[in-house]
Amino acid sequence: MFLALTNYGHRLISEFIAHCDMGLIETQPELSALARTWESLVLPADGGPLQARLVERGWLVEIGPAPDLTELRLRYRRNPLENVQRLIFEFTTLCNLDCQHCRNGGVRPATASRLDRLVEAVDLMMAIGVRRFDFIGGEVTLYGKGWLDVVRHIATYEGASSAVLTSGWFLGEAEFLAANQRYSDSSAYIDALAEAGLTHVVFSLDGPAEVHDAMRDVPGLHDRILGCFDAVRTAGLTPQVSLLGSTPWSKEAAILRWMTEVSGALYGDMGSPSERVARLFADDMNYVSNLIGVGNGATLPPGEGRIMLDQVDPSFLRCKNFFRPHPSLRIQADGELCLCPLLGAATGYGNIGEKTLIEVLNCIQTAPVAELHGTGQIARYLRYLDREIFGEEFAHVCTLRVVVTLLARGIEEQGVDPNDAQALRALNERVARQAGFLPPVGPVATGITRPR
């Protein structure tokens, strides 16, 4: 009988070997056993308590009496945790805005309830070299009750960073509640974030002021954000931005001027316009993305670069992030591990409310959705897309990937018979409501009104 490294065990010992003295590893029996397994691919099972502990922790797994070393070597090289650099907590889907482009449009309300599991996740990811933790929503700062307790735990680790993505709704506010705590004004709130150990505040910006404020229906918000960076820095935090660089109203020249303005507010007016824009992209703590037509964004008019279904290359439907994520892992508000930020299409790996995070991480590549994309089988489900519902074109390849993935999961995991026209039509309608192409049914997470 032999033992092999799990996904987590392989990433763990790889980190130690890359950053530690091998002599130090040899002085620690558990790490020494992992290092021997890493070097020889397998470890002969001896039935001893040390190996039993390593199996119990999820660092080693029993693989039988005759391991295929070629296959095992390939599995190690394809470790889905190899390129993970940050852990994202989708702490809540609740939000006080209902932005025109929101990917969560139609998502049902949820807020993280197992804070102990999130704290445990921090410890586990720190052990394998992940030092960045981002909190997203929804609006975490408003509805994320208890999120700062997790931030305080992250702050106990030297070199760790924690960031929150926010609309900046609190800027200019007075006597307000944020995550069930009262603050006198936005300066007091920013100070409280710094005191809790948060390191970065990432403000969402959707384009030039007139575009941003219209998409969020909050007049003056864009300029309040650009004007708050000095106050954020004074409090000891680093301001960053999450930029939506492409919308149906995007004009290249205007977007470049806008990005130059944002860069100047963040870093100062240094260098040429192109150098300033390049600095935004080079700063890994910023987010920069295009509009993905899901959720509320599915109803926006398509811009340039539309994808015609009759011209789709089937290979484009395969997304590596579903089986070998980079750079992020994501824990949703309901506890599901998710490898893609779009509508939970890349869920189905496991829930940390039901299993330990290590158990979930060690089975990523065996999840049905990972196998669909890993083998390229996802492409054969395109034929089941109902064009009467979705139309003949998509604004972004990721929108099409989401829709086809949700259809595939409905067929395979929910037992929908693709030869049953009525059942297939019903599945397409459910997916269309989930993806935003049809109006949602029942309560949704966005649009929760808050007096301003």
Image: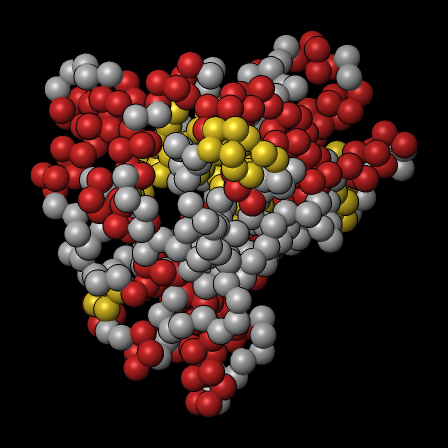
- In the image, 134 versus 145, the foreground residue is 145
Q: Could you tell me residue 427's position as x and y percent?
A: 47, 78
Q: Residue at x 35, y 18 (%)?
A: 230
Q: Is residue 323 visible?
A: no
Q: Residue at x 48, y 28 (%)?
A: 185
Q: Residue at x 23, y 68 (%)?
A: 393
- In the image, 48 versus 58, the foreground residue is 58
Q: Quadrant of residue 17?
A: top right
Q: Residue at x 49, y 73 (%)?
A: 441
- In the image, 41 versus 197, the foreground residue is 197
Q: Could you tell me residue 423's position as x and y percent?
A: 49, 86
Q: Could you tell me residue 348's position as x and y percent?
A: 59, 58
Name the quadrant of the N terminus. top right
- In the image, 113 versus 404, the foreground residue is 113
Q: Could you tell me residue 422's position as x and y percent?
A: 46, 90
Q: How many marks?
A: 0
Q: Quadrant of residue 253?
A: top left
In the image, 23: left or right of 392?
right
In the image, 242: left or right of 418?
left
Name the quadrant of the C terminus. top left
Q: Is residue 143 visible?
A: yes
- Above or below, 237 against 177 in this view is above
Which residue occupies the extreme left position in the image? 253
In the image, 261: left or right of 317?
left
> What's the image's color scheme?
secondary structure
Q: Quadrant of residue 105?
A: bottom left
